[in-house]
Amino acid sequence: MKSNLFRLLSAVLFAAALFVVTSSANAATVHVVATLTDLADLARNVGGDHVDVFSLATGIEDTHGVPMKPSFVPRMNRADLVLLVGFDCEHAFLPALLEASKNPRIQLGKPGYVDCSQGILPMDVPKSTDHSEGDVHPYGNPHYMLDPVLAKTTVKNIYAAFVATAPQYEADFTRNRDAYLAKLDAKIAEWQRLAVVLKGVKFVSYHEHWPYFAARFGLNYVGTIELKPGIDPTPRHIEELIAEIKADHVPIVVREPQFPEKVPALIAKDTGATLVKLPIMPGGVPNTGTYIEMMDFIVHAMIAAVSK
């Protein structure tokens, strides 16, 4: 009888201990909200099992105007960290979500507000922020994640935020960071080797997403189909752009999935250029669910376009 009672008591104590350990592990999970899918993917790679990551975007939205959903607010309320691209990229939706959340941990200036652009030198900082120039970004072009070398800085910023939030997991975060950076470095070397054929190649795109990508791989970014950032093209602008493409023998027209195909297709048809649909976030087109898959798709699609 005593033996049975002892076994029962031991089982109860073991279960209680297991519950405490499991509850502690669950409590220690770092809850992360990322504004865009590229940041979410990097966070999952660095955080591993110690983070729960939710992306506000799915990959198909305009990075400057992710539609706000009521379901976002509970996510923001629980978040320990919010990861943002910065350079005013999320100005149209993030400030309102932060205000609605009432979460003191993730407000501007707090440790949970993680601007992933820290340490990145912006391109195309405007001389004027007059609204007549379109939806200009006063701190510079925010699409630096399309340069995989600059994405390494983002990885390091995310890592630092994770260590500061959950220092007990620093060894795991460090191991995950180093493994991911080694993988990314190997892909960067591959992309740079393959992209030699892209050096000097001229292209236009719908929106000005590509200056960092062009600078990294040596392309010549001629201009945009948009009249100005966020402003649809006029018939006159389209005519002038077609004439420029013909005169300069521009071989590629890039269409991002966030924008309608009609005008880019028309321009490509009238000029003989190749129309290429390129994602600007993971998930923007099929088979680009991770950051590395997205960059791999972009590089290979551009190479295929110039090889035609």
Image (cartoon, grey):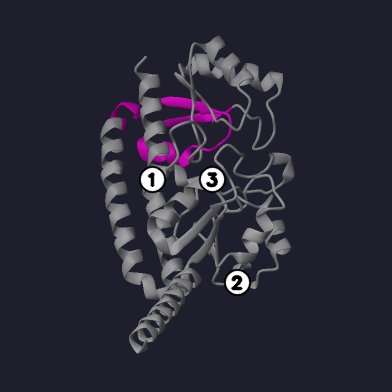
| 113 sits to left or right of 67 | left
Q: Dot 2: few (<14), some (14–19), or many (≥20) neighbours within 10 Å?
A: some
Q: In which image quadrant can residue 80 be found?
A: bottom right
Looking at the image, which is closer to me, 187 or 169?
169
Identified by mark 2, the residue type is: Arg
* Element under disc 2: helix
Indicate whether residue 168 is drawn in magenta: no
* Element under disc 3: loop
Sequence order check, earlier mark of 1 and 2? 2
Sequence order check, earlier mark of 3 and 1? 3
Q: Would you name the residue on which mark 2 appears?
A: 105
Q: Would you name the residue on which mark 3 appears?
A: 124
Looking at the image, residue 82 lies above or below residue 149: below
| 33 sits to left or right of 298 | right
Q: Residue at x 62, y 29 (%)?
A: 259
Residue 83: tell me if it is visible: no
Identified by mark 3, the residue type is: Asp
Looking at the image, which is closer to me, 173 or 204?
173
Sequence order check, earlier mark of 3 and 2? 2
Residue extending farthest front = 1
Task: Give the spatial CA distance, label 3 vs label 2.
Answer: 32 Å
Q: In which image quadrant can residue 1 be found?
A: bottom left
Q: Residue at x 54, y 54 (%)?
A: 54
Identify the disc placed on residue 148.
1
Q: Nearer the viewer, mark 1 or mark 2?
A: 2
Q: Dot 3: few (<14), some (14–19), or many (≥20) neighbours within 10 Å?
A: some
The spot of residue 290 in percent (x, y) is 42, 43
Residue span colored magenta: 195-224
Looking at the image, which is closer to me, 53 or 164?
53
Identified by mark 1, the residue type is: Pro
Task: Give the spatial CA distance, label 1 vs label 2.
Answer: 30 Å
| 235 sits to left or right of 80 | right
